[in-house]
Image (tube, rainbow, N blue to C red):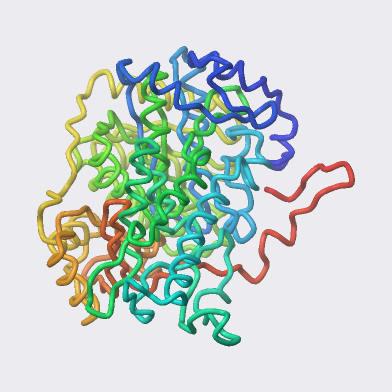
Amino acid sequence: MLTDIEIAQRAKMEPIEKIAEKIGVKAEELEFYGNDKAKLSGAVWERVKTNSDGKLVLVTAINPTPAGEGKTTTTVGLGQAMAKIGKKAMIALREPSLGPVMGIKGGAAGGGYAQVVPMEDINLHFTGDFHAITAANNLLCAMIDNHIMQGNALGIDPTKIAFKRVMDMNDRALRQVVVGLGGKTNGYVREDGFMITVASEVMAILCMAENLTDLKARLGRIVIGYTYDGAEVKARDLKAEGAMCALLKDAIKPNLVQTLENTPCLMHGGPFANIAHGCNSVQATKLALKLSDYVITEAGFGADLGAEKFLDIKCRVANLKPSAVVLVATVRALKYNGGVAKADLGEENTEALSRGIVNLGKHIENLRLYGIPVIVAINRFGQDTDAELKIIEQYCLDNGADFALSEVFAKGGEGGVALAEKLVDVIERTESRFAPIYDETLPIKEKIETIVKKIYGGDGVSYTAAAEKQIAALEQVGYGKLPVCMAKTQYSLSDDAKLLGRPSGFTVTVKEVRVFAGAGFVTVYAGSIMTMPGLPKSPAAERIDISENGVISGLF
């Protein structure tokens, strides 16, 4: 079979203005990036904001494994399938981060015959959104250090600066650095560190902002650190928010692209639900709902992270009401959860599948807590046997869960028709009674413990002395009523990556709690979690190349 990039390079793309026509967007409302990418201007929203909303469908997955689950592939394929059965559908996706593209994942725009294109552009610089976020973030960092060097009128304590520099690349050497070395003219010497761009508060702010005015206000609320007296210092105290917003004036506009089958897709912001909020932008989702009858969107990693944050943070803040959730699972991933090594996943093993399927069961239970209908998408791989597929189907039947086989990787939209028909049927016969699982006015600890006990299945939470202190301080200054954004391993329901399946009897350890005041949530760091990943022993970058004619290869 052709590789993902080879399939993408053979795609018959339509000019982006023709894709825009399908959703009622005029050419003069587009800001073109070549022939096949465009940003939607603010004029589109002003024209359609009074339209009725379409149906919102979230695609999520079981806990990710090295075997792969195909969440983005399913999202794209389902969008194509909805168009195939005659529905006016759009897709709303997150943009890929360069770190994973050059690290472990390679391409991150779907796979097989369910991809968004131009695949190479999307996976590399795209329209420059992440570069703009990086620039805005690091401008603020430069202004912080400059302020201290130029007399420190605000009395910022250099040991209590909470805002870090960022770069959109996996680079472990930058996790902990010292800045200001080389003498007085180079600034104040202090410890610092880098996060990956997509884990930054600026990324979250871009995704949560309703418009430019809201964006600037949110940027101004960023807590950059504390004075010697313990008072908060915000970005607006440094007069940084205007310039930061200016750098983001284009990045805030959603990007329009297409699938291999020319289904419209908005891609905008939001990867990394293990260390960030992991959802695409509020603007893209709301705009898609005004332009189509069905919006197929996704959130990062498994349902315990991405879906939880989508439902408890994004939907709450943006007043979104999902009509259904599609939960992606594979035979391979469930066998891995049942104890099978990656190298042996191609062999039939019904016993291991039966052991590992409890992971799927827990995610079904979790999503039902939100009052939303759930459809299990069984993402079929070529080596899956009928006996294995029947086990999943019977498990769904026994647990009263709707399901459908998905073969979009190999067959594109045609392979997702059964899933699309099931989705429409479920939406038409089942009313969504969506509600977040906690009241945001509860104390921070109660919100954390609700997620740990109800979603993760843990016994409780332990807090380091530092975390206890941070929670008390945040509640004292009025941040206790914000939603919580959990940062933990994506590989397990617990905070221990090695605990697969459906672990029980565990306690989640909270090590650090920080406020992202501009984004509008409190981030809780649990277990061993890093905000700057590293490259693997054999990074995908080793296999990415370009010919003398400019043809890129290796973005698998």
Tell me which residue sits at (40%, 31%) in the image.
Answer: 404
Counting from the top left corner in percent of width and height, residue 504 is at 23, 66
Q: Residue at x 54, y 27 (%)?
A: 415
Q: Is residue 93 above or below residue 83?
A: below
Q: Nearer the viewer, residue 370 or 503?
A: 370
What residue sits 29% from the left and 35% below the top? 374
Q: Residue at x 27, y 37 (%)?
A: 318
Give the residue at the far right of this rendering. 548
The quarter holding residue 46 reads: top left
In the foreground, 54 or 360: 54
Tag count in the figure? 0
Locate residue 279 relative to residue 438 in the image: left or right: right
Furthest-left residue in this view: 442
Q: Is residue 39 left or right of residue 144?
A: right
x and y, in percent, of residue 483 in the image:
22, 53
Q: Quadrant of the N terminus?
A: top right
Residue 162 drawn at (x, y percent): 36, 70
Residue 322, x across and y down, in percent: 28, 32
| In the depicted structure, whether residue 530 falls above or below residue 551 | below
User: Closest to the observer: 141 or 364?
Assistant: 141
**As drawn, 151 above or below 116:** below
Q: Residue furthest bottom?
A: 183
